[in-house]
Amino acid sequence: MIPVVAILNLTNLGASMQQIGSVLAVGTVWCVLQEEINKFFWWPLHLSSYLLTLGPIPLLIGAGLLREQTVVISIGPGWIPVAVAGILIFLLSLRAHRRLDSYAGI
């Protein structure tokens, strides 16, 4: 039997991943609109898409484990738009990858 504290930490990990991914995405999403993208801004944007897309996994696993412990819990649909935004950011960052600075002249 898994302790409830560990299950709550797992559930909180999913929400934290989405929060960190959201802050990174908001701070770096403007680089997709540029003609040339600096790789130091592109990488945080690309990595934020992983955090946003994979964030619901520990959230839903933790909620399922809490239900097994007979804790009444329900997960609302608030994680769906964040996961869709993560997929969209992932696709946009892959599309923008060909516009990365090459620094060939340095």
Image (tube, helix red, strand yellow):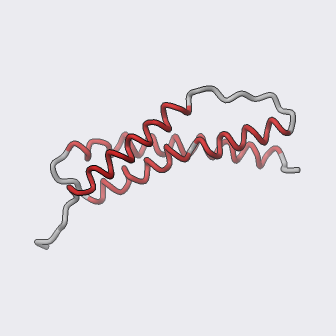
**Residue 57 percent across, percent down from the top left:** 62, 45
* Nearer to me, 83 or 26: 83
**Residue 34 percent across, percent down from the top left:** 19, 46
59 relative to 37 in the view: left or right: right
Q: Is residue 77 above or below residue 59?
A: above
* Nearer to me, 91 or 55: 91
Residue pictured at 22% horizontal, 54% vertical: 37
Residue pictured at 39% horizontal, 47% vertical: 90
The quadrant the C terminus occupies is bottom left
The answer to which image quadrant residue 41 occupies is bottom left
The answer to which image quadrant residue 85 occupies is top left
**Residue 89 percent across, percent down from the top left:** 37, 43
Number of numbered discs visible in the structure rendering: 0
Residue pictured at 53% horizontal, 32% vertical: 80
* Nearer to me, 53 or 27: 53
**Residue 6 percent across, percent down from the top left:** 77, 49
17 relative to 48 in the view: left or right: right
Residue pictured at 70% horizontal, 44% vertical: 61
Q: Is residue 74 above or below residue 17?
A: above
12 relative to 78 in the view: left or right: right
